[in-house]
Image (tube, grey):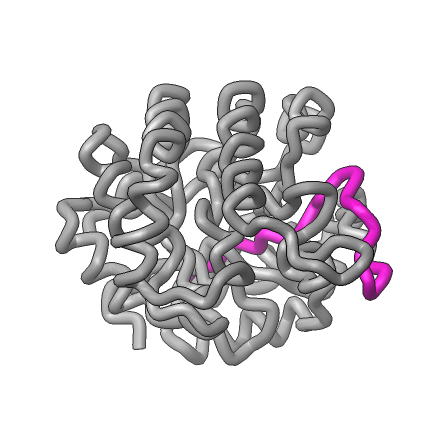
Amino acid sequence: MNKYNIPDYHLHSSFSADCDTDINELVKTAMSKGLSSICFTDHNDLDFPDTPDKLVFDLDIQEYIPTLMELKDKYLSSGFDIRIGVEQGVMPSTCEKLNSYSEEHPGLDFIICSSHVVDGGDPYYKENWLYPDGTPKDANKLYTEYFEDMLYNVQNFRDYNVYGHIDYIFRFGDKINSNIFGEKYFPRYKEILHEILKTIMENGKGIEINTGSLYRGLDFPHPHIEILKMYKDLGGEILTFGSDAHDLEHIGHAFDGAAELAKSIGFRYYCTFKGMKPDYINL
């Protein structure tokens, strides 16, 4: 069910190192779920640290864009609209290298900027929450470093449209629910989150509502409602919706509920992107 007909703007295929979903099956499933448009956003994480499962997140952009353009043409006559995007994993050390990516690779419609690394590793892996001797790291220090790096990114990186799953790290840290986050963690990081969101908005960028957390154990989408409210209060308007699906099952997951959440906060539009430029569509 997708009564708002919102396109999924955060999807992964076999072009991502952590996904083996066939691009044709992805499109067919999206159509069967009632979507009329999607945007592929496969991973490109330059200089990504070594992972326990030896994944390499460098996107083969020279094959990616032509392949998706061909797919786009294939489904055009059916009225299904395919957009071509990238999820750009950014670190302070890669901001400068990636700042002209869309100019260097014409054909891109959309770029998500995401933070996937803290303290030299992806918090997805439990090993990165531990020191080599097995003792746990201070989670609050990791959260702080994560948001400090994000602030640096938004101050120094410009070649993107929305910042993805801003509170991604909370998928994998302390076991929390929405109330605990709102009462304990949001007040602790409120000041730096305010500066991050203010910078995003002032630079003409936006954020996404990412429902991937809802099928990964959290009871709130990314970002938490308090972060969404802060963004709206600052005057933020650019908003996309993404499932972060790495499989067929979760394409467009919980979009109706996410749209209702956005409307309850006061958002009137969501955005689609073509050629890196936004179009505003009424919710």
Q: Position of residue 132 (x, y in %)?
A: 81, 55
Looking at the image, which is closer to me, 138 or 207?
138
Q: Is residue 220 visible?
A: yes
Looking at the image, which residue is at 66% across and 34% down?
A: 91
Q: Is residue 44 magenta?
A: yes
Looking at the image, which is closer to me, 38 or 147?
147
Q: Say whether residue 28 is left or right of residue 268.
A: right
Q: Position of residue 267 (x, y in %)?
A: 19, 45
Looking at the image, which is closer to me, 154 or 251?
154
Q: What is the count of numbered marks?
A: 0
Quarter where residue 254 is shown: bottom left
Residue span colored magenta: 37-55
Looking at the image, which residue is at 69% across and 32% down?
A: 105
Quarter where residue 189 is shown: top left
Looking at the image, which residue is at 33% across and 25% down?
A: 198
Q: Say whether residue 151 is left or right of residue 102.
A: left
